[in-house]
Image (tube, rainbow, N blue to C red):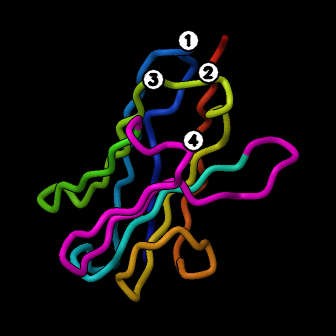
Amino acid sequence: EAQVVESGGGLVQAGGSLRLSCEVSGFPFDDYAIGWFRQAPGKEREGVSGISTVGGATYYADSVKGRFTISSDMAKNTVYLQMNSLKPEDTAVYYCAGDSAGLGGLASREYDYWGQGTQVTVSS
């Protein structure tokens, strides 16, 4: 059974950092792209970052460029999202998802498998 499981969320002050982890199982890690999405209360889900199996290309939303970094550890079947210089507007539930096409873009419709999400709260 394909699964993606997020961890690492929490409460942090503005300007602080968190690292989210996405552990993948049940499908070939190196054939999929992994994306991070977030959804704040009352807002639509938005793509934050993605990493592609096609040459390891990475993608970032404009709102997080220069602050967030996505990386993968194939030995651990895990993708990380390092989030620095966090702002209150980064507060959301963060979801990890797998894309069987391996593209890793920021469009949620491309993704097949979704985790349950992890809450990130940034206080001002």
Label 2 secondary element: strand
Query: In front: 67, or 103?
Result: 67
Disc assigned to residue 118? 4
Pointers 1 and 2 in contact (CB under 8 A)? yes
The residue at 66%/23% (across/down) is 88
Left/right placement of residue 106 relative to residue 74 reads right
Q: Where in the figure is residue 16, as x and y percent of width and height?
A: 45, 16
Circle 1 sits on which residue?
A: 13
Q: CA distance from mark 3 to mark 2?
A: 10 Å
Looking at the picture, which amino acid does disc 4 mark?
Thr
Give the mark nearer the N terminus: 3 vs 1: 1
Looking at the picture, which amino acid does disc 3 mark?
Ser
Looking at the picture, which amino acid does disc 1 mark?
Gln
Circle 3 sits on which residue?
A: 85
- Considering the whole magenta stretch, tell me its main secondary structure: loop
Circle 2 sits on which residue?
A: 122
The residue at 82%/50% (across/down) is 43
Up/down of 76 relative to 101, above or below: above
Disc assigned to residue 55? none
